[in-house]
Image (spheres, grey):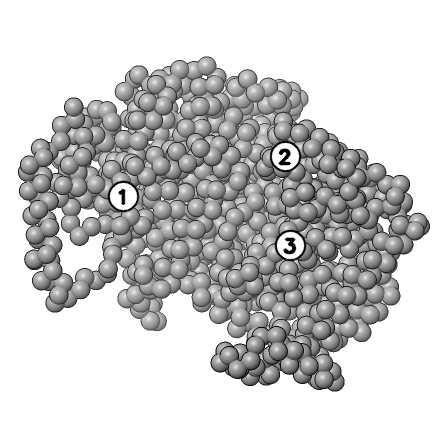
Amino acid sequence: MNETFTQNPLEKLRGEIEHWESNEVAAFLSKQAERKEQFFTTGDFPVQRVYTAADIAETPLEDIGLPGRYPFTRGPYPTMYRSRVWTMRQIAGFGTGEDTNKRFKYLISQGQTGLSTDFDMPTLMGYDSDHPMSDGEVGREGVAVDTLADMEALYEGIDLENISVSMTINPSAWILLAMYVALAEKRGLDLNRLSGTIQADILKEYMAQKEFIYPIAPSVRIVRDCISFCGRNMKRYNPINISGYHISEAGASPLQEAAFTMANLIVYVEEVLKTGMNVDEFAPRLAFFYVSQADLFEEVAKFRALRRCYARIMKERFGAKNPESMRLRFHCQTAAATLTKPQYRINIVRTAFQALAAVLGGCQSLHTNGYDEAFAIPTEDAMRLALRTQQVIAEETNVTNVIDPVGGSYYLESLTNEFEKRIFEILDYVDENGGAIKLIEEGWFQKQIADFAYETALRKQSGEKPVIGVNTMVEEDENQEIETHPYDYSTADRQIARTKRVRAERDNARVETLLEELVSVAKDETRNIMPVTIELVREGATMGDIVEKLKPVWGTYRETPVF
Amino acid sequence: MSQPIRVLLAKVGLDGHDRGVKIVARALRDAGMDVIYTGLHRSPEEVVTAAVQEDVDVLGVSLLSGVQMTVFPKIFDLLRTNGADDMIVVAGGVMPDEDVVNLKKMGVSEVLLQDTPPQLIIDTLTCLVEERGAR
Amino acid sequence: MGVYLPSVELIARVQRGEPAAIGRLISRAESGMAEARDALARIHKLAGRAHVVGMTGVPGSGKSTLVSQLAQRLRAGGDKLGIIAIDPSSPYSGGSILGDRIRMSDLSADPGVYIRSMATHGATGGMARAALEAVDILDAAGFGVIILETVGVGQDEVEIVRASHTTVVVSAPGLGDEVQAIKAGLLEIADIHVVSKCDRGDANRTLTDLKQMLTLGIHEQAPSDWAVPVIGTSSVSGEGLDELLGAIARHRDLASDTDAGRARRKSIAEFRLRKTAENLLYDRFNAATAAASAKLAEQLMRRESDPYSLAEELLSTTLEGEGDHERDVHSKSA
C-alpha cells in the first residue's frame, strides 16, 4: 500500500481550511477583493490561494522519493550539487574557428567549466560559406564550419578529454559529429573518453525552430545513426539533446514544451530499438535541454515532473532495466525571448531569476543569457556578467547545499503532479492520433505552439501579461547607450579562403568516390551513415558537398505553415 | 466596398524563427487584410518576384539572423529594377538601433521590433497605406 | 511606379509581359474599380489564346504541390505559365492568409511563371469575375497556359474551376474512407481525375473507388467521346505527371474545334456574363438601398410590417433608381 497521510488528520485539516475560508479570508475579501479573480501560472494552470497537505494527500510518497532513485523526481543523482555544482556552459560562436576559439579560452579563464558551440546559419542549414544563400550570414550568429580544418581551429589548444563540448546543431549534426570524431582521432584521443553533446534533435525543428534540410523520415534515420554510433563508440558522449528550449522560444507553454519533448523522445527510442539495440545500451546517454522561465515554481515543477515522466516512460513503456536509462539529465538556458530592448539592464535581473529556477529544478548544466541579446549576439562583457550570475547562485546563495530544496512544498508538489498528469494526457493524445511524426506532418504541434504564442502576444498587448519596461513602467525617451558585438565583415573572406584551400589541396577523386559511397549508404536504410561521413570529412569534403549530394537522394522538406 | 490591404510577409535568409511573423500574419488577417506568406528561407530575389506579382501594398520582411544590412539593399535594388519602387517596405525582427536608422534611410518605412503589440502593427500598416493613397 | 498611372497606359506594358504592370492591372480588376473597365475591355479583346486549366480538390489533396510540379514540366516544354491560386477568406474578419506560394517555391526564380494569390472575399466579393479578368490579363501578357487553382469547397470555388477549358479534380488517399470528390460534389465536374500521393500504400483503393464511381457514367461537360481518365500521380517519384500533361493536351485538342468545345466556351461566357452582372447588380443595390434599408429595418423591428413586404419595397426603390449607378461607379474610382 502507498503510504499517505492518515484520514483523520486530513479531514480535520479540510475542515479547518473551510473554516478559514469562511472566516479570515471572507472577512478580508469583504473589505478588499484580491488582485484578480483567478490566478494562473505562465502556462495557464489555475492556482489556488494556498496549498496544504490536503492537496498532496493522494500523492504516494515514493513519487516524491529521493534523489538519485526512481522515479528521480528530486534529481538524477543522490548528492547533486553537494558533490559538484552544475556545469557552467555559456554558449559561444561567431566568426571563424579562430575567433570563437579565443572566446572559449576567455570563458575558461573566467571559470566556465564546459563549452557550448553556436554555429552560424549556413553551417546549421548545411551550406558552405561560399553558397549564395550564405551571403551576409557567414560567422554572424555563430561560428562558420565548412571543413575539418575549421573544426581544428575551433578547438585548437582545448583539452577535449577533460572539458565537455556541446554543439548546437541539428539537420547537419551528423557531419559535425563526424568532424569531431575525425579531429579526436587525428589528435590520437580515445573516443570513449570524450564527453559532450550534439543536439541532433530534428523533430523539434519541424515543430518549432524550423532548421531542416531533408524530409522527416531520412532525417530521423540520421538521428538514429548518431545515437547508435555513439552508443557503440563514444561511451561518454550524448548523441542527442532532446530540446524543449526552441519549442518554448517558438511560443509554446511550459506544459507543451515538456510534453512535446517526451513525444519526440518516444519516436527516437522506437527508431533506435528497431535497429536491434537494447534500450539500456543507449538510453543512459540520452540528454535533454529545456528553457527556464521566470515563473519559478512552475519551472521547478516542470523539471521535476519531466524527470518523473521520463523515468516512467523508460521503465514502463520501453522496459529499461538500468536505472541510468531512467534518469533524465538536462541542460538549461534562460529564456532569450523574454529579453527586452527597452531598459535592457532589467535583463540581468530576469536572467538571474530564471537561472535560480533552473538550479532549484536540478539542471546539470546551465547557460545564462547576456543582457544585450535583444540587440545582437552577446559581447564578452555581457557573457562575463551572465557567468557571474551563475557563480553567485553557486557560491553565495547556499541553495546548492540541500538537494531539491523546494521539494515538499505543498504548492510545488501539487503543480508537479498536475504537470505529470497533463504531460501524459498529451502523450495519450499523440499515441491515439498516430504518433508524433504524423502529427508533425499534420501541423498539430505547430498549431498548438502558434496558438499559445498568439495568445501571449495579445496578453502582452492588453497588459494582462506585464513586461516591465515594455507594457508597464515604460521610460519615455530612454537613452539606449549600449555597446554591441560588432560583426567583422572580413569573416566571410577569411572563411571562404580556407574552404577554397581545403578544396584545392584534397584528393578530389577520393572525395568523389566517397560521395558515391555516401549515396549508396543513404539509399540503404539498414546501414549507418556515420562511418562514411567520417571518412569524407577526413578527406576534406565540405559540409556543402555532403549535404548537396544527398538532396537528390532524399529530397528536401518544405513545411506547410499553420497559423 | 474597398479592397483589403494586401501584405506579403516573407522570411528572408536562413533563420527559421517564425514566431513573430506568424503572429503578425494572424493579426493582419484578423484585421481583414489579405496576407500572402512565402514561407521560410527565401532569397531577396524570390521575395521581390513574389511581391511584384502579387502587387502587394506592403512588403514585410522578417529576419532574426542579423543579415538586414545585406538583405535590404538587395531588396530595394530589385524593387527598382522591377519598377515597383512605390511598394511600402516594412522590416521586422531583432536588430540594433543603428541598423534601424540606416534601414529607414534606405527606404524602409517602419521597423517593427520584437514585442511590438499586434494592434500597433495593424495601425501602422493601415496608416502607411492611407498615406500612400491610390495607385 | 510612383504616380497614379491610368489603367489603359498599363496595357502595352502588360503585353510586353512586365510583371509590375500585370500585377497592378490585376489589382485594379480585383477591386472592381470603374477606371479599369476600359483597359479590361481592351485586354479582353487581346486575350483568348491561352488554355485555361482549372484544378481543385479538398484541402490536403496535394494540389498545390501538383500544380508546382506540373508547372515545371510545362516550363520545360517552353510554355509561359500563369497560376491563379484562390483561397478562402476568413468568414469572421474578411481577411485571409494565402500560403500557396510556399508549395510552389520551386518556381519562384522563374520569370516564365507568374503566380497570383487571390482571396475569395465572401460570396459577394466578385472573386469569380476578378479571377477571369486576371486570366485575361495573363493571357494578353502571353502566358500560354493558365492554371486556376481553388480549394474544392464552396460554390464559387467550384464554379470558377468549371469555368475553365479543362477541369482537373485532385483526390488523395488517406483523407477519409469516402471518395472525397463525391463528398465535395466534384465528381461530375472533372474532365480529368487525379489521385495524388500514389507512392502511399492506400492509394490504390482511392484509384479503384474513383474508377468505379465513374463507370456509373456521371459527367456533365466533357465531349461525348471523352472518357474521363483517372491518373495516379506522385510528387515523390514524379509518376503520372507526364500522363497528366498528356491528358490535358489531348483534352485541349479535342475541345478546340468540336461542338462540345463550343458549348463549353459558351457556357463559360455565360457564367462570366452572369457573374459580372451579379457584381454590378449587387454594388448598385447596396449603394441605392443604403439609406432606405436602415429606415425599413426600423419598421421591421417595430413589427409595423413583415420582411417580404418591406423587401419588395426596398427592391422597388432600387429598380426605380436605375439611373443612380453612374454616381456610384465614379465614386469607386477614387
Instruction: State left or right for residue B82 relative to residue A138.
Output: right
The residue sitting at 60% across, 83% down in the picture is C292
Whether labels 3 and 2 share one chain: yes
- The residues bearing labels 1 and 2 have C-alpha atoms spaced at a distance of 43 Å
Residue at image point 68% right, 42% down: C181
Question: Which residue type carries mark 2?
Answer: Pro
Residue A293 percent coordinates (x, y): 30, 47
Q: Nearer the viewer, mark 3 or mark 2?
A: 3
- Circle 2: element type: loop
Q: Bin the neighbour count of mark 1 within 10 Å (Cα to Cα): few under 14, some 14-19, many 20 and up.
A: many
The secondary structure type at the circle numbered 1 is: helix
Res A299 label: 1
Label 1 resides on the chain identified as: A
Left or right relative to A71: residue C290: right
Mark number, residue C154: 3
Task: Name which of mark 3 and mark 2 comes first in the sequence.
Answer: 3
Q: CA distance from mark 3 to mark 1?
A: 47 Å
In percent of width and height, residue A185 lies at 44, 19
Check the image and report above or below for C202 versus A124. above
Residue A62's disc is none
Q: Chain of mark 3?
A: C
Q: Position of residue A414 (x, y in %)?
A: 21, 41
Between B30 and A405, the one nearer to me in the picture: B30
* Mark 3 residue type: Gly
Q: Which mark is residue C173?
A: 2
Left or right of residue C334, residue C45 in this image: right
